């Protein structure tokens, strides 16, 4: 049994204790991603294309292809995937997420003429499509992962080096926090609120939202591509409906519980075909708000108890999550031509003087 | 907002941190019992009479009346109540629970000729009835309370002096532990296992079970005596069935999760009439085992989410709990003529050499 916190990230002395006694033994095995000491910080870039359902699908997929095309230039991400979801306002959103193992490389990529020129082009504002980028760069001590499997890690795990053995910190409320290396010494509390610093969501056009320290981002995934009939049924009949209900609650009522944005997305290929893989992307005011919701909301508790019931027998159904917090200075939230409830815009304060 | 831990019980320095950040705010008000500094330790004595359903009801009620009669002699308990439940083996158990604010007074009571003579009398072993006493004496830092109301505190609250204002440590998993003053500096871990030190449960007769440090005892109560029709329906239709399912699980499968004994009991008067008041009495190997079950078992999570849903509107329906740990030296578990699965006997190890 290993700690979820890698040796080189162990704080000495630890100033915040764990919740459970040393004798704690988890009831089933789970695993975390491992990276060597050269991984100091990663970048997770969610790059979106938005359109009102109708004739824009082809144009939106072309925009996605353009974005994915820029990943092949120097300093592109080491890993990416593409998803689709319909939001509360009925818009379809295609999101490409890229993972970089080094924010300096990400920065060079972002500033490259192809990428920068595309984003700054007046064309981005003149068409029928909306675009957004929501990007965070957590340091190694600011994120944690959890997998019920050990191969072909998705998401940030794909830019890590290895998988752990069975880890101790899981299967109790508070274990998510305790898997963060930073939790050993820091409460990761929110430093403020979202503020619109450029443009006005109500006017469309170009909007920049300023985040704050310790916005929490969770990606929580379900992959039944390889599942046999039984696991497929388990997922589609037992897990998926409850998951959908919980995620719909957060999409529609997030502001009441500290959830800035919540999207249950389904993976697609470059042609827009749906794959048997979904994940939820949730942005939270703080890790604490995410904890409070997760451990008290009936839908999430049902997800949790179902997971407990089935986890020991999982074969090809792949369940996982990754959670990060980030410094306000390491966040980018920008929107072009998007509807005013998109992403961080919904809960961002527009300053009265502007 | 106050801490559940009273000022005079605040550890300085605290060596084990809380689970939640300082900014934590509970979503609804709850209260705890307050005692002044003269309360150093209490005694909770569960005194049982057991019989196989049938003709022994009158005799059992007479035995209960005898026990309650001894409370009137010097050094009797400051508070008591009486309950009835049928156990897994189909035996009826009547339990009188007495609360003392001072274990020295309890000790004098226990050793008084009336009490001692009654317990030691050969008559206790010759009739159709069984008897047991399960007694713990937690120190002030070894127990916590939680009430959704502020008047006429039941249980240990009845021997305390006052009720708190709204307290901070509730409505998150881990808050029970954090309400224990001792949790500031001690993990309250189990020191061993139950051992039969006198007699043999299989033989009936006189059996003494030796406990161990930090056995946790929870009394978790529901009182709908004064409830109007709506709250009565809420309790009987929404809360009670789930509660029953969860408590039945623990009664029948407790050994798989670290629960030594679990009894959902209903209050009665001295004539044996059922009252609209129940509570669960659970003995656990450790507070940690209780925490793990409570936060992961579907039935308890349903109880918890129902409570969250209704708590803000409670009027006359009274929900509360008290939880203690105790030193092995401050525990008495004794059985006379009881069936071998009674109380602590079920999970107690019979030494091979005996």
Image (cartoon, coloured by chain):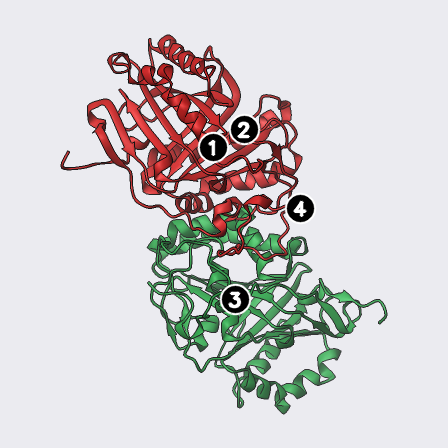
Chain colours: A red, B green
Q: Element under label 1?
A: loop
Marks 3/1 in contact by CB < 8 Å: the verdict is: no
Q: Is residue B313 above or below residue A88?
A: below
Q: Which residue is mark 4?
A: A1
Q: Which residue is mark 3?
A: B185
Circles 2 and 1 on the same subunit:
yes
Circles 2 and 4 on the same subunit:
yes
Question: Alpha-carbon distance for marks 1 and 4?
Answer: 27 Å
Name the one closer to the observer, B303 or A75. A75
Seen at 46% across and 46% down, the residue is A295
- Label placed on residue B231: none
Question: Alpha-carbon distance for marks 2 and 4?
Answer: 24 Å
Circles 3 and 1 on the same subunit:
no
Q: Which residue is mark 1?
A: A42
Name the one closer to the observer, A108 or A92. A108
Q: Quadrant of the N terminus of chain B?
A: bottom left
**Chain ID at mark 3:** B
Q: Which residue is mark 2?
A: A159
């Amino acid at each position: 049994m290993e700690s979820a916190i890698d040796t080189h990230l162990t704080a000495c002395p630890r100033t915040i204790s764990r919740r459970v006694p040393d004798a704690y033994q988890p009831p089933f095995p789970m695993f975390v991603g491992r990276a060597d000491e050269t991984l100091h910080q990663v970048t997770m870039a969610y790059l979106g294309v938005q359109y009102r359902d109708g004739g824009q699908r082809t144009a939106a997929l072309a925009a996605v292809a353009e974005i994915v095309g820029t990943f092949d230039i120097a300093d592109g991400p080491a890993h990416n995937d593409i998803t689709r979801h319909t939001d509360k306002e009925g818009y379809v959103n295609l999101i490409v997420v890229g993972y970089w193992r080094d924010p300096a490389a990400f920065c060079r990529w972002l500033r490259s003429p192809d990428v920068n020129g595309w984003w700054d082009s007046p064309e981005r504002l003149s068409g029928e499509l909306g675009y957004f980028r929501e990007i965070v760069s957590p340091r190694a001590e600011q994120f944690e992962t959890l997998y019920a499997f050990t191969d072909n890690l998705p998401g940030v795990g794909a830019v890590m080096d290895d998988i752990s053995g069975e880890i101790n910190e899981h299967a109790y409320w508070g274990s998510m926090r305790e898997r963060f290396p930073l939790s050993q010494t820091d409460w990761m509390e929110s430093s403020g609120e979202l503020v619109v610093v450029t443009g006005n969501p109500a006017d469309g056009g170009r909007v920049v939202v300023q985040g704050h320290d310790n916005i929490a981002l969770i990606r929580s995934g379900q992959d039944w591509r390889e599942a046999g009939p039984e696991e497929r049924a388990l997922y589609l009949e037992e897990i998926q409906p409850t998951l959908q209900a919980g995620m719909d609650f957060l999409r529609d009522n997030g502001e009441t519980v500290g959830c800035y944005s919540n999207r249950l997305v389904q993976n697609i290929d470059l042609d827009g075909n749906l794959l048997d893989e979904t994940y939820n992307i949730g942005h939270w005011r703080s890790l604490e708000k995410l904890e409070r919701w997760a451990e008290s909301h009936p839908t999430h508790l049902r997800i949790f108890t179902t997971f407990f019931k089935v986890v020991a027998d999982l074969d090809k159904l792949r369940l996982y999550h990754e959670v990060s917090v980030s410094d306000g200075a390491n966040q980018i939230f920008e929107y072009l031509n998007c509807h005013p409830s998109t992403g961080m815009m919904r809960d961002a304060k527009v300053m009265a003087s502007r």
